[in-house]
Image: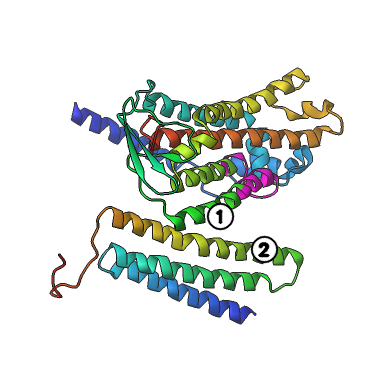
Amino acid sequence: MKRLGLIAIIIFGGLLFSITFELPDLGDASSPASTHVSPYYIEHTLEDTSVPNVVTAILADYRGYDTLFETAVIFSAGLACFFLLRIPERKAPKARFYRHLTTGLTLRIEKGGRIPEESKEFERIDSAWVPNDVIINMTCRLVVPFVQLFALYVIAHGHHSPGGGFQGGVIFGAAIILFAISNNLRSTTRRLSEKSSALLGSGGVIIYLGTGLLCILLGAGFLNYSGLSVFPGLDPVSARSYGILIVEIGVGIAVTAVMVWIYYNLASAGTQEEGL
Amino acid sequence: MSLLAAILIISGLFFFTGGSIGILRFPDFYSRLHPAGKLDTMGLLMTMTGMALYTVQEFTLAAIFTSLKILLIIVFVFITSPTATHAILDAGVRAGLSPWTAPGKGERE
């Protein structure tokens, strides 16, 4: 059986390998892709969509279907992590630890013990708590807003420079994860809870899908943003430009939320109680 | 200006080379972090300054903006790179890795 598998692999691998010689060379000017497809996009993108960045226009407009399902794939990756890792029942932990903020005293509360949860004096800490490092904390606090600003810039400036929803979303998610690493998981989920990250993740996909459906309702094809030109102040060309922007924002939201969601599940081993 | 930029970039590359040799040759984790943290930051500082000077040669608004962006890279790397080194080193200490000592110079307890 093993030998049979090896023979099959050699035959089909050799077949694939021999076929690669038939493919046009990289950058071959006379290949079909370079003679028909690329010149069309290069020549018509600006007049069709008024977007100077050809890559963005192809990604979000000419091949909108492809990107829609890419976003759906990212969302389902987050969903898969959720289903595989998340521990559904909220078992009460054996002991909880609290730290008195002014004195640094640590309290261990056994199961059934009581402490005012919303106390200003005490802060809940992880069982594997390590003292906060001032240098790392301050640096991350300094850097995170700039990283987020840069992420928004990458999303919004995708029309003119390299960038767009996927890249900006990843940078934004990395900023939130950086905050979670430098502080702790609990203070991060207080700001962006698991539920809202899941809702944002699906919301991003829905923004994309909703734009496409809106185009149908307005009488154009699915994801044909020129249908949006019924709104005041838009002609078909600029409507496509704005349609691309809306779609990129949806992609950015989805990617950010899914990144953070996956991080929550991985860092806390599914409990979402405490983690890195 | 071009000459100055070239000198800066070449000396930055010199620092990078020293950093790579140090990472390869030093005996243990902590001493390897030393060239990784210091020399890479210094090398990047010098090469990026050289590039900023090279860009600003033709004195237009776009060139000035580009070189300002390069200077921003320097600022952020200057803040974050030593912090990253510090975080890695801190993790090493907390994991209980003891530093290397020269053989024959007396064993550590």
Chain for numbered disc 2: B
Where is residue A14 drawn, in percent x and y?
34, 38
Q: Secondary structure at mark 2?
A: helix
Chain for numbered disc 1: A
Where is residue B82 drawn, in percent x and y?
45, 63
Q: Residues within 10 Å of mark 2 (few under 14, many from 20)?
A: some
Q: Which residues are magenta?
A: A149-167
- Residue occupied by mark 2: B66
Where is residue A273 drawn, in percent x and y?
40, 32
Residue at image location 47% in from the left, 43% down from the top? A180
Amino acid residing under circle 2: Thr
Amino acid residing under circle 1: Leu
Residue nearer the viewer, A157 or A47:
A157
- Residue occupied by mark 1: A142
Residue at image location 60% in from the left, 41% down from the top? A33
Residue at image location 12% in from the left, 74% down from the top? B104
Residue nearer the viewer, A51 or B42:
B42
Hey, which quadrant is residue A83 in on the image? top left
| Residue reaching furthest to the right | A233
Residue nearer the viewer, B13 or A220:
B13
Hey, which quadrant is residue B57 in on the image? bottom right
Quadrant occupied by the C terminus of chain A: top left
Using the rendered image, report if marks 1 and 2 lie on a common chain.
no
| B15 left or right, relative to A211 | left
